[in-house]
Amino acid sequence: GNVDIECDMLVIGAGPGGYSAAFRAADLGMKTVIVERYATLGGVCLNVGCIPSKALLHNAAVIDEVAHMAKNGIKFGTPEVDIDALRGYKEQVINKLTGGLAGMAKMRKVEQVRGVGAFLDANHMEVQITSGTGKDLNGEKKVVKFKQAVIAAGSQAVKLPFIPNDPRIVDSTGALELKSVPKRMLIIGGGIIGLEMGTVYSTLGARLDVVELSDGLMQGADRDLVKVWQDWNAHRFDNIMLSSKTTSIVPKEDGIWVTFEGPKAPTEAQCYDLVLYSTGRSPNGKKVGAENAGVIVDERGFIAVDKQMRTNVPNIFAIGDLVGQPMLAHKAVHEAHVAAENAAGHKAYFDARVIPGVAYTDPEVAWVGLTEDQAKKDGIKITKGVFPWAASGRAIANGRTEGFTKLIFDAENGQILGGAIVGPHAGDMIGEICLGIEMGADAVDIGKTIHPHPTMGESIGMAAEVAKGVCT
Ligand code: FAD
């Protein structure tokens, strides 16, 4: 058939996985094409995920922090929020980053083909060209012939079948549009994404309810950390319904009426101005015509890969959200480099010991590696070192002593296996623990590392000191 473009490397999807793979491949000398339906590079993370949520959370954190200043003798008064300007700020942040990516692509001569791609076979992809927002196909088609390919088509929010269509019922993308501030907001699914968005809306004035099927919010993190977050945030919520579910969701003129089932569920239907469903994301593996290339996709849409990020088809790699949990941008980026390096003929392996997770709430909750709850469940003998922030000079000076730093060591040899932090900027601190785990550090290494005083980072050294007394 007709071939419009030929390349060494074709990447489908321009999220953190896709652009990282494309850039690395180009840097290694491959002629690279990236197929993306939307006008901008950056995928979910930059356009409707990590970055816009953090732009809004930053503003929310400042509003909350300023409110705490009153007890120190500094009063700012009630903040006046211009929601259009706030939305504009968020857009600016996105544009700056996606613009930067476009520049980096150009510099590397990575060609973007804008459209919806589908494999024709293991060396050809047909792209239905898009225009406008990315939803409109303009009827034009292009065929790209490639030697190697990386599938990086990401994931999308799961919309459960019983959730009706209504502009007041949104997923995270809809919530990030920040059209208005509701009086009452329901969050269906109490994971990181739901609680981050809830933090933003609540700071802007919404009252929150959350309904969660499991028996706790922020699953994956140790319960002692979540408790600190929950105590600090109790004022935002009217009702936290755990081990609960919605039984009906009915849009009416005056609001969205929802009924629930569960131990703390109200018997009466509740009325909300905004309902956010954040019950997980499903991989886009089935949306790229992978079967035409012979790539095996499981029934949920995940694509299996080996440690080189290679699918069952030798010249086709897959990375990011569609190869499995955790669905996080930093995982996608590292997988991308491995895939591109292998495609370019180098030998590389995705061999991370640990991948950190962070809830950018206030306080932040961050954890990596073995958790205490998991160790208990699996009967792993650990020694833990906990340093409460109430004993940190810096935390006291900052007026934020609710947090703590916890390190988990192998009880036998003192090697660090995991760590978790709850408190402001926990996400910025967790990287040190990741490094410690990757380097095989033990409690003595960490305890004897001199941390600057007074910082919250010191709490990591102190937690190791606490544990060291037991391990050495
Ligand atoms: P994606 O970013 O999903 O990109 C895939 C791209 O492929 C999309 O642009 C899509 O348009 C394109 N595409 C799909 N199919 C086709 C096709 N057939 N043709 C052409 N193009 C196609 N992660 C973090 O690490 N930290 C955070 O703070 C964080 N916050 C988040 C907040 C929210 C609200 C959400 C929703 C997610 C957040 N995540 C966060 C997760 C993070 O966004 C994802 O893990 C990351 O974007 C995955 O990258 P990816 O490269 O796999 O794919």
Image: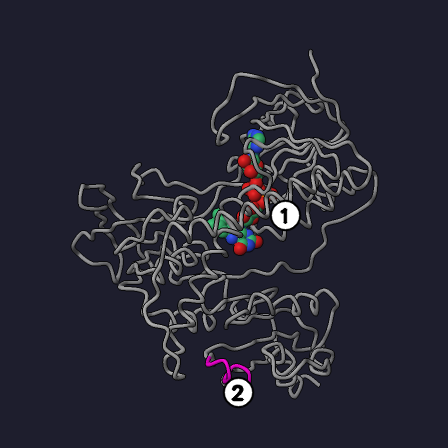
Q: From the viewer's perspective, is 385 left or right of 277? A: right
Q: Is residue 450 visible to the viewer in this orientation of the structure?
A: yes
Quadrant of the rendering where the N terminus is positioned: top right
Mark 1 CB within 8 Å of ligand 1? yes
Where residue 378 sits in the image (x, y, percent)? 56, 66
Q: Secondary structure at mark 2?
A: helix
Q: From the viewer's perspective, is 231 left or right of 10? A: left
For image coordinates 31% across by 70% down, the residue present is 235
For image coordinates 19% across by 41% down, the residue present is 252
Q: Is residue 315 visible to the viewer in this orientation of the structure?
A: no
Return the residue at label 1. Answer: 332
Q: Amino acid at mark 1?
A: Ala
Where residue 435 sits in the image (x, y, percent)? 70, 66
Question: Is 172 in the magenta?
Answer: no
Where residue 26 sits in the image (x, y, percent)? 77, 38
> Taking 391 as reference, is 381 above or below it?
above
* Lower position in the chain sequence, tag 2 or tag 1: 1
Return the residue at label 2. Answer: 391
**Residue situated in front as seen by the camera: 424 or 366:** 424
For image coordinates 51% across by 71% down, the residue present is 424
Q: From the viewer's perspective, is 187 left or right of 418? A: left
> Taking 33 as reference, is 233 above or below it?
below
Where residue 3 sits in the image (x, y, percent)? 70, 16
Q: Quadrant of residue 114?
A: top right
Q: Quadrant of residue 238?
A: bottom left
Q: Which residues are magenta?
A: 393-399
